[in-house]
Image (cartoon, helix red, strand yellow):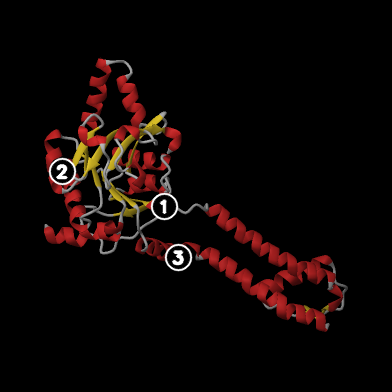
Amino acid sequence: MRHSRRQLEPRHYTLRRRDRTPAWVDVSWRIVLAFALIGIALAVHWFDRDGLRQANGAPITFLDVLYFTMITVTTVGYGDIVPVTQQARMFDTFVVTPIRLFVWLIFLGTAYNFLLKQVWEKWRMTMIQRNLDGHIIVAGYGLSGSEAVGELIKRGTDPKTIVVIDENAAALRAAEACDVAVMEGNATRNAALEAAQVARARSIIVAAGRDDTSILIVLTARRLAPTVPISVVIRSEDNEPIAHQAGASTVINPASFAGLLLAGSTQGAHIAEYMADLAATGGQVALRQRAVTADEVGRPLAQIGTGLGHRIYRGDRSFGFWEIEAGKLQDGDQIVEVVPRERL
């Protein structure tokens, strides 16, 4: 079974990103360009029609010029109409011949557009993948993963800095619609996370939909990226300590959070509303974590001027605003504060 699974695992993982240019636009501009080049040749031939002669000696009409232009642009001509002056011959040599080549390249390029585009996109995604740095990896694009990506974008994160890893093709198509980079693969495998440059990521979000899979992804990611923050969604409360032991920086239990909101609502009608206000993008206030500044060192948490300080993190310990340790900020402290939404 191990051998068959290894063979099914793709050897190379590559990024993919939605092309913003619709196919009809691509084809349309090619057709317009081709007819524009033919129009230039037609106009010059018409204004210089005295330099053309028919084999039967008949006068040159507009239809003759149109016929001669199309035959000359698409082929080398049949000899029934020929340029006889030096000016007409020079025009056919140095203008019509390049136009002929461009028109053929345009139509051949359209015919082979998909092949050439695939090669170009593969090269472009390889370059993006190789230069990934400071990005956010989302392992799993189910309900929680898609909500996380949407919330990140609403909060101002550039979609180009988000990489979604999933094995489900439909989920990846949905992620592509958000203009993020996607990668088809199994995030529990070293190769998939290494291809997403996990060691250079800013943070990792794990939302595989199953606790065992999510914990395995955390284990793999933590081994490859010892210092990158990892947030994971865990459904069962019993698995939360295991996720922490696996290396998760933050463990989120949706059911527990919903329970907090429900319980809070029984203590006051506005408690749950305020908690949701803090968490939602469209709320009036927001929670923000930042490092203490040099001018704040030595001052109490209550006197910071950027927001309402709630907690500080000092190493592996945390202190609330009411504790004595919060009375004197130290260099290296992380402050969690509530700020008005517009300040973000």
Q: Are marks 1 and 3 in contact (CB under 8 Å)?
A: no
Q: Residue at x 50, y 63 (%)?
A: 113
Q: Residues within 10 Å of mark 1 (few under 14, many from 20)?
A: some
Q: Which residue is mark 2?
A: 243
Q: Tell me which numbered mark, 3 or 2, is placed earlier along the sequence.
A: 3
Q: Quadrant of the C terminus?
A: top left
Pinpoint residue 167: horizontal percent, then vertical percent. Answer: 27, 50
Residue 336 marker: none
Q: Is residue 19 shown left or right of residue 184?
A: right
Q: Would you place residue 113 above or below residue 241 in this image? A: below
Which structural element holds mark 3?
Answer: helix
Where residue 101 sits, quadrant-wise, is bottom right
Pinpoint residue 215: horizontal percent, then vertical percent. Answer: 17, 46
Q: Residue at x 21, y 33 (%)?
A: 324
Q: Quadrant of the N terminus?
A: bottom left
Where residue 305 sits, quadrant-wise, is top left
Give the CA separation, mark 2 to mark 1. 29 Å
Give the CA separation, mark 1 to mark 3. 18 Å
Q: Residue at x 74, y 67 (%)?
A: 40
Q: Which residue is mark 3?
A: 120
Q: Tell me which numbered mark, 2 or 1, is placed earlier along the sequence.
A: 1
* Whether residue 46 can be seen here: yes
Q: Looking at the image, which is closer to me, 216 or 177? A: 216
Q: Which residue is mark 1?
A: 160
Q: Nearer the viewer, mark 1 or mark 3?
A: 1
Three-letter code for the amino acid on which mark 1 is drawn: Lys
Q: Tell me which numbered mark, 1 or 3, is placed earlier along the sequence.
A: 3
Q: Is residue 178 shown left or right of residue 263?
A: right
